[in-house]
Each structure stands twice: as C-alpha cells, then as structure tokens.
Amino acid sequence: MKKSILILLLILIAAVVGAAGCLGGGNGLDDSNSANDTDLENDTAEPPNEPTNPSSNATIITAFNASIVTVDPLPAGFTHLATRSVVGSTQGLGIPNALTGYRNMLTYDNSNIYLSVYRCVPPTTADDQIQEMIVSHQDKYGGDSKMSTVWINGHDAVLLEATVLEAPQEGRYILVWTNWSGDQYDNSYLVVVNGQVNYSVIQTLAEASNL
C-alpha cells in the first residue's frame, strides 16, 4: 500500500514538472509572436519622404563669384568672350530689382548668348523675380508673348518666348529658373540664359552650366 502511494506521488511530481515545461514553451511562442508583430508594424509603416527632384544633379550654389557662370568644358560651337558683374534691373530682361549678378557672354555661330546668375537676398526670392519677369514680358509683347515650363538640370524652368517677326534685343527666348538650397533663410539665385539664337542653343548652354 505504501509502495503504491509512493508511485502515485512520483507520477504526480512528473506531471507537475511536465506542465511547467509546457508553460515555459508557451512563453517562447509568445516571444516569437511579439517579434512577428514588430516586423508587421515595420512593414506597414509609412516610407520616409523622398526628395522632390530625385533625378536632379544640379550644382547648388554655395559661393557667389564670377566662377559660377564659367562653363568648362564649353559645348562644341561656343566661344567665351567675357565675364563681368552686372545689375539685374539694367539688363532688359524684366528683372525688377537691382540684383547683383555675374554674366558670361559667349558667341555661337556669330551670335551672342548670355548665361547670368543673380543673387536674391531674403526676403526677396528668385521665384518672386520670375513672376515679375513673366508679367513684364507679357506687358512688353502682349499677344506676341508666350510662356511655357521646361525641365533643366533637375529644375522646373520658365521659358519666355517673344513670337514677334524681328528678334528682340534680349533675344527671342529667355530661359530662367531658380537655384536654391531650400532653406528659407538662404539666398536664392536667379539663373538666366538668353540670346539671339535658336532655343536648342540656349538649352545646350543651360544644361552645360549644370546649375
């Protein structure tokens, strides 16, 4: 009888130990499920913000001097004539403010073409200047003024065209865009390419500037 009771006690102890092992295994499964929950949260999280223009490789202007309008190497057919400092409001381009700038004068097939960069000090912005240039162009040429948007070096650029019979002094085409780091406290820069040449020539110089 005592022997039977002893055997029964041993069986009960073994059962208790087995149950404890099962409970421990259950905790392990809970840990695994927790890890899976974390993975699921990561999968459903919103992706980080992508850059506005991921394909842009344009050079951001960090130092303002005459070298910013130097194009090296020059595309075939272009000849450099001179680089000089200029004031934006005196160039006949419709720039309303007396912005400090640098202008690179070149020739292509015996015609002049210009690459200019002007600095806009806050609160004046290059975008503000472009809007004023659009209005000035429309006022100057009326129904012979045409405005469109093109893509240059990772930027939206504005193309102003004078569809008059005779090419105006500043050229039939004025291509303008902004170069800016995006910081509201930074200077923004107005980039302008114009001349009495076909648009394809202006586009070539604009792309070669890498601005």
Image (cartoon, rainbow, N blue to C red):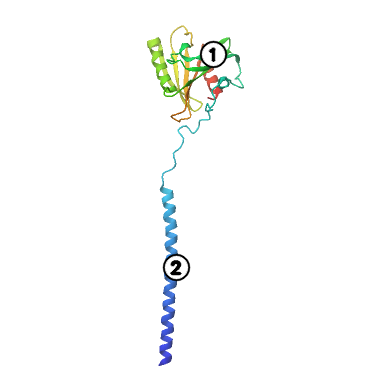
User: Does label 1 or label 2 sit earlier along the sequence?
Assistant: 2
- Compare residues 66 and 21 and report the one nearer the observer: 66
Tag 2: residue type?
Answer: Gly
Callout 1–callout 2 Cβ contact below 8 Å: no
- Compare residues 185 and 105 and report the one nearer the observer: 185
Q: 89 left or right of 201?
A: left
Q: Secondary structure at mark 1?
A: strand
Name which residue lies at 43% across and 49% down. 43
Name the residue carrying label 1: 113
Name which residue lies at 41% across and 92% down. 2
- Which of the 4 image quadrants contains residue 147? top left
- In the rendering, which numbered label is found on residue 25? 2
- In the rendering, which numbered label is found on residue 128? none
Tag 1: residue type?
Answer: Ile
Which image quarter holds the N terminus? bottom left
- Which of the 4 image quadrants contains residue 132? top left
Query: Crowding at label 1, few (<14), some or many (≥20) Cα neighbours within 10 Å?
Result: many
Q: Secondary structure at mark 2?
A: helix
Residue 150: x %, y % from top left: 46, 23
Residue 6: x %, y % from top left: 43, 88
